[in-house]
């Protein structure tokens, strides 16, 4: 339906353009790269985030920039890409999958990421001024095909014995994935009220345990993946590297935070970026764009949605006001088993995803419940048709939330895995998926500092 509507609007635009009733916007082109031929170029260029650099004091001048083109098609997109090659740009990435045609180009050490959303007849051209490692960001290993996904079981607030919200968290999320080469992928990191000193140390012990490393050895985190810029998704990990950076070999980070001048984020995000740069000055950073796909050991990560997809190709403005709807949504695949990471996406992001893709794209084995079950993202839950739903929330509190009601339309109670109940972990390999559980020795918040460094 969306593709038919977009094609109809493109036909109408083409007629009006030929009649001289509308402009093609060619005078609007602002990037230092050959202009796009065809379609309509947006009047405004989009300020696309500062990557690893804190922008708490306003735009830094280092932001990436994005041009938007509407009323175009795959033929015009290919003509443009060939134009770039003829102009001396090297193609360093190509992907045509799920209705997204994506390519990346480099010239004079500058990266440009270009992608077409076929269902909307829109192209985004991004001057990526922040990714410091693109072509060689990922890697493959021959150690096996299985992974284990852990949902860390912080104490969460509920309406029983854990009702005190001064010491128990109402949100917070962190997933730890053990890969076949014994490295880890960490997704996000919990809230302030989950970041007791003891819990930080327990998490470090847990990572040593699942990797079989001694306290004197470093735990290798191959990738930290940040979904969006809220403190309940970064504070615990921020404190973890403050306390245990010497025990952690953090190799890569991936996130796509919008500019603070356009979309809010928590101050902890800027502190986290500064801490990353201080402890890991040589870390590889990727600003992940839609259509990009890469390997980390034996998993494949497909980027399905970023904050850039919400930006209107007609106005250059973003409807995203809260960082939740700018969540970086990815599908993680291992041994043909799939884990859909939704971050805190709300209805706006869900609707954008549904516009962009056929529903089959969302089919997975495990889905992470969006925004701690606060949002009724029923369409994604339905299309996912998963075996299990990871719920970063207590069962007592979650039971009263709209997202829980929408998920329960499609999933039984024993498919809903609440982080407040246990440390659930799912083994995904060629034999299928298997659920197990344990407990960690985590405690309520103890008023300890977030900023101490050991």
Image: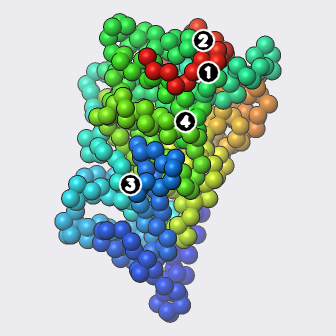
Q: Is residue 140 left or right of residue 255?
A: left
Instruction: Give residue 334's quadrant in the image.
Output: top left
Question: Sequence order check: which comes first, mark 1 or mark 4?
Answer: 1
Separation of marks 2 and 1 at Cα, in angstroms: 8 Å
Q: Along the horizontal axis of the image, is 371 left or right of 132?
A: right
Sequence-first disc among 2 and 3: 3
Q: Are marks 2 and 1 in contact (CB under 8 Å)?
A: yes
Instruction: Confirm or deny contact between disc 2 and disc 4 (CB under 8 A).
Output: no
**Label 2 CA crowd tier, 10 Å (few <14, some 14–19, many 20+):** many
Which label lies toward us, 3 or 1?
A: 3
Residue 120 location (% of width, % of height): 51, 64
Mark number displayed over residue 268: 4
What residue is at 36 percent from the left and 16 percent from the top? Answer: 247
The foreground one among 319 and 418 is: 319
Residue drawn at 48 percent across, 31 percent down: 187
Q: Which residue is mark 3?
A: 62
Q: Nearer the viewer, mark 2 or mark 3?
A: 3
> Which of the colour schemes (rainbow, by chain, secondary structure, one colour) is used?
rainbow
The circle drawn on residue 138 is none
The relative height of residue 236 versus residue 344 in the rendered view (above or below) is: above
Mark toward the start of the polypeptide (2 vs 1): 1
Element at label 3: loop
> What residue is pinned by disc 1?
194
């Amino acid at each position: 339906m969306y593709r038919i509507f977009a094609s109809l609007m493109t036909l109408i635009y083409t007629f009006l353009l030929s009649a001289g009733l509308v402009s093609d916007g060619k005078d609007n082109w602002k990037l230092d790269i050959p202009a796009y031929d065809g379609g309509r170029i947006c009047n405004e260029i989009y300020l696309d985030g500062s990557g690893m650099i804190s922008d708490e004091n306003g735009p830094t001048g280092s932001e990436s920039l994005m041009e938007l083109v509407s009323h175009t098609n795959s033929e015009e997109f290919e003509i443009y890409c060939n134009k770039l090659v003829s102009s001396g740009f090297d193609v360093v990435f190509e992907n045509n999958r799920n209705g997204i045609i994506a390519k990346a180009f480099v010239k004079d050490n500058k990266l440009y990421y270009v992608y077409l959303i076929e269902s909307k007849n829109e192209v985004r051209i991004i001057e990526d001024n922040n990714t410091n490692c693109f072509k060689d960001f990922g890697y493959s290993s021959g150690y096996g095909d299985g992974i284990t996904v852990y949902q860390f079981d912080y104490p969460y607030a509920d309406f029983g014995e854990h009702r005190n919200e001064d010491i128990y968290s109402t949100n917070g999320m962190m997933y730890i994935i053990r890969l076949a080469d014994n490295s880890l992928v960490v997704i996000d990191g919990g809230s302030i009220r989950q970041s007791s000193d003891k819990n930080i140390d327990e998490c470090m012990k847990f990572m040593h345990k699942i990797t079989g490393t001694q306290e004197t050895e470093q735990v290798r985190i191959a990738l930290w993946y940040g979904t969006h810029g809220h403190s309940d998704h970064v504070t615990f990990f921020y404190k973890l590297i403050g306390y245990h950076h010497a025990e952690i070999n953090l190799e890569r980070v991936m996130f796509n935070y919008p500019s603070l001048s356009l979309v809010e984020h928590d101050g902890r995000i800027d502190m986290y970026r500064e801490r990353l740069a201080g402890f890991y000055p040589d870390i590889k950073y990727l600003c992940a764009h839609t259509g990009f796909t890469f390997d980390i050991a034996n998993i494949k990560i497909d980027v399905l949605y970023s904050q850039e997809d919400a930006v209107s190709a007609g106005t250059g403005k973003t409807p995203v006001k809260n960082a939740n709807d700018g969540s970086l949504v990815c599908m993680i695949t291992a041994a043909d088993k799939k884990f859909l990471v939704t971050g805190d996406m709300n209805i706006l992001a869900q609707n954008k995803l549904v516009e962009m893709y056929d529903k089959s794209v969302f089919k997975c084995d495990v889905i992470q419940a969006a925004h701690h079950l606060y949002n009724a993202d029923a369409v994604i839950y339905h299309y996912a048709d998963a075996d299990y739903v990871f719920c970063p929330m207590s069962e007592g509190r979650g039971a009263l939330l709209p997202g829980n009601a929408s998920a329960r339309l499609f999933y039984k109670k024993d498919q809903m895995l609440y982080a407040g109940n246990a440390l659930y972990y799912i083994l995904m390999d060629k034999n299928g998926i298997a659920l197990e559980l344990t407990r960690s020795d985590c405690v309520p918040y103890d008023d300890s500092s977030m900023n101490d460094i050991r």
